[in-house]
Image: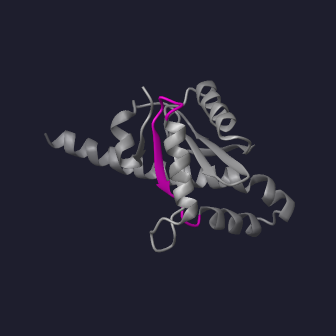
Amino acid sequence: MPASVITVEELLPLLPARGPLIGLDLGTKTIGIAISDVERRLAQPLLTLARRKFTLDAQDLVALAAQNAALGFVLGLPLDMDGGSGPRAQSTRAFARNFARLTELPIALWDERLSTVAVTRDLIEQGASRARRAQVVDRMAAAFILEGALSRLKIMDEARSRLDARE
């Protein structure tokens, strides 16, 4: 059965207690990829995939998920600063819908406003050269996106545990 494109809030009930998630920062020329640990506490940059054709990119992502026993994807959604959906967000949603037809793993969208800006700022502060920043910014942005989603999942899981304890 094909996957569905959902929110991070809708992702939580679909996940077992343990298992990694893959974070994606979708660009026009590259896809930054990050992965969480099995406890879903930390996100680490994994690699940057040069974009080719959609089908080839999707096959690479599905294979990567299988190699890492990932349970789902968190795809950064580049909303406009006012929360609206511009051309990049629409393109990302189209990618997610098409990708969902090729995998059974859930694909959760996560607001990624300013993720690349934040990562670039951190790299500059660390003294990374322009060439080094170009090499790592996409996968680091994917980790930034995944970290945000993991934090949200943790908060939701803790709230659910408190409710369960009261019952």
Q: Position of residue 153 (x, y in %)?
A: 40, 47
Q: How is the image coloured?
A: one colour
Q: Position of residue 22 (x, y in %)?
A: 57, 40
Asked if residue 14 lies left or right of residue 122, the reply is left
Residue at (20%, 45%) from the top-left corner?
A: 163
Q: Residue furthest bottom?
A: 82
Q: Is residue 125 above or below residue 158?
A: below
Asked if residue 32 lies left or right of residue 15, the reply is right
The magenta span reads 101-114
Name the one closer to the observer, 39 or 98: 98
Residue 113 counted in the magenta span? yes
- Quarter of the image holding residue 165? top left
Asked if residue 3 lies left or right of residue 115, the reply is left
Residue 26 counted in the magenta span? no
Q: Position of residue 65 (x, y in %)?
A: 59, 30
The secondary structure making up most of the magenta span is: loop
Residue at (46%, 74%) from the top-left corner?
A: 82
Q: Is residue 69 above or below residue 161?
A: above
Work out which quarter of the rendered image holds the C terminus and state it.
Answer: top left
